[in-house]
Image (cartoon, coloured by chain):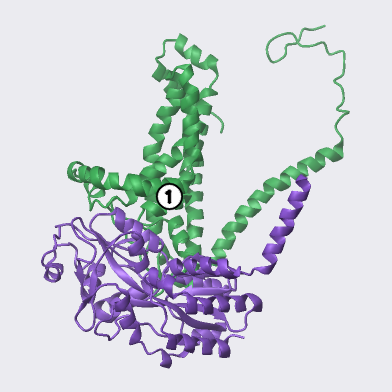
Amino acid sequence: MSIASDEFGGPAPPRRFKSPAPERSSGAGDTIFKGLTGAMAALVLIVMGGAALAMLWGGLLAFKTFGLRFLWSSDWDAVAHKFGAFVPIYGTLVTSAIAIVMAVPISFGIAIFLTELAPKWLRGPVGTAIELLAAVPSIIYGMWGLFVFVPFVATYLEPWMNDHVGTLPIIGPLFSGPPIGIGMLTAGTILAIMILPFITAVMRDVFGAVPAELKESAVALGSTTWEVISHVSLPYTRSAVVGAIFLGLGRSLGETMAVTFVLGNAHDFSLSLFMPGNSIAAAIANEFTEADSPLYVSSLIALGFLLFVVTFIVLALAKLMLLRLGRMEGAKT
Amino acid sequence: MLRTILAVMAVATVAGAAGAEQITGAGSTFVYPVLSKWSADYSVKFGDKVNYQSIGSGGGISQIKAGTVDFGATDKPLSPVELAASGLAQFPVVIGAISPVVNIAGVRPGQMKFSGPLLADIYLGRIKKWNDPGIRALNPGVPLPNAAITCVHRSDGSGTTYNWAYYLGQVSPVWKAKVGAGTSVQWPVGVGGKGNEGVAAFVNQIPNSIGYVEYAYVIQNHMKYGLVRNSAGRFIGPTVAGFQAAAATAHWAHAKDFFLVMTNAPSAAGYPITATTFVLMYKHPKNAARSAAALKFFKWSFEHGQADAAALDYVSLPPVLVKQIERYWATQIK
């Protein structure tokens, strides 16, 4: 008889015996299970679609009254019944951007430290401490922010930035303004602290899951630790890392209580990060229960719908970025 | 043994709950300190509990219109037309005052003097620094810094805001044209805090800031309040005598459904920013027992709650007004 080979190059088993038929599968049970799990997956999509449609329906009055102008108008006048979403959208995007810019490098550093550099006895306690940060309720962050962080920012950080960073050519106007402490920079910083544990936890798990053979092979070929991280670990875990970042971003886009304590809830647009602003979640939380006219309520619901849209766009960008990175490296995503 | 104890406890809870009514209310944060004191004393004496959520006047109005609470409390009175459309009755329950508060180093409580137009200009953003000549003219000896003013206002819909904005509209035509009065207005400048508590917290945290809070919060948080010049030209501080003088000039007898805003009262010794809190209840309530229990609670508060109200620096309603309210109940709320 001919010696065939299996996929590992070893000898194939002799083909004298037929493979046994799958006797233990009962067709009905499998079908029911498949249907049930399919229904649950469909339920998630239905609930999400339903929520989006409900908000679109509720915000229809505002969209019809203001049209596309709703997106870039910075009015918010309950007496004259004129509303515009620009300031809340801008505040949401800016505070989340600040949070991501601050949190991602720090999370990355913590994850690398915990997986590559820390001595084994330190990994447990530090890892637990990071995870405890995630367990702190967001309103505690808001209170800590208002009573501890805001005075610090107003007394030391903002005056220093006014003098040293506010005078630089292009980014100067972003970092100069009255040092009241409450504003987009403070809110962004507190958001960064809040999303840090989520990003760190996922990054640490995926960096730990890189197969040891890959890392050892790289080291055997003469790579430094940094080259192992940047050329082996990161490409291997690329989609999970991007997923972690967008997990954190998603949380910061929707964060309400911590932001409303320290953002200032002012419907004014200003370029300076020191000035107070407003975010979609904070505006809805503050004003929904007291919105006294149908147009006011509809404008707030329309804001909620726009938050949905913003989150969706951000996630779509994440997927696109992953797809492009994957194509560049020839891998399938 | 354990089972007996558990059974006795269960019976006692059920029995205890059966007799007492649970009256729910929501609305103005302005009135929250005195309502919670009254409800604590009332439940000790009579067993009925009043559960009051201070979510803001706008919230109180929408919750009573939605029928989720037994009474709503609002500092912004509804017009008789609006009341008739929703089947609601309205009556005043307590009179309080709104005080401008500042956070300036070296300034003592009661030292700053403001006039109505000055407050309007500060909140319009026309006066930007504390050492502006307009402020210095009224406050000669006060150490005013060369610092930007941070205005603190309410971020949520509020009857306190309504009375404040209404007063500023009465004394400043520019304010009336540009901003107007409402439970939520488009503030030209400033940061927003949630509730009277939020404004107090922000003013305490931010140096060189000014805010407006209900007077009970000023006392509880030891804030630096300012005096305000009334329509007779005198600088009056927030004292019970000042509130009572202002309340005495309000013409309640002529107001249908008590629809009257009493800021800038034409009284020589009256504090100019006094405000009334109103309670809204259904004329034909769905739950008549709870509505009747709520009316009993308010009747007791009018007759026996004056000491509590005075201790918290509110003004109890004058007896003539209480009689008018009780006649209103008899005719309007069945």
Relative height, residue A293 to residue B331 (above, below): above
- State the image coordinates of residue B175 (x, y, percent, origin top left): 27, 76
The chain letter for the residue carrying disc 1 is: A
Q: Colour of chain B?
A: purple
Residue A278, image quadrant: bottom left
Taking the view exactly as shown, the residue that stands out farthest to the bottom is B254
Which residue is pictured at 67% across the width and 64% down the height?
Answer: B17
Q: Give, as a three-letter code, the residue at label 1.
A: Ala
- State the image coordinates of residue B143 (x, y, percent, origin top left): 13, 60
- Mark 1 nearby-residue class (10 Å; few <14, some 14–19, many ≥20): many
- State the image coordinates of residue B88 (x, y, percent, origin top left): 55, 82
- Horizontal side of residue B112 vs A133, given as left or right: left
SS for tag 1? helix
Let me know if residue B8 appears in the view: yes
Chain letter for the green colouring in the rendering:
A
Which residue is pictured at 15% across the width and 60% down the height?
Answer: B144
- Horizontal side of residue B238 vs A167, given as left or right: right
Query: How many numbered circles are shown?
Result: 1
Q: Nearer the viewer, residue A181 or B8?
A: B8
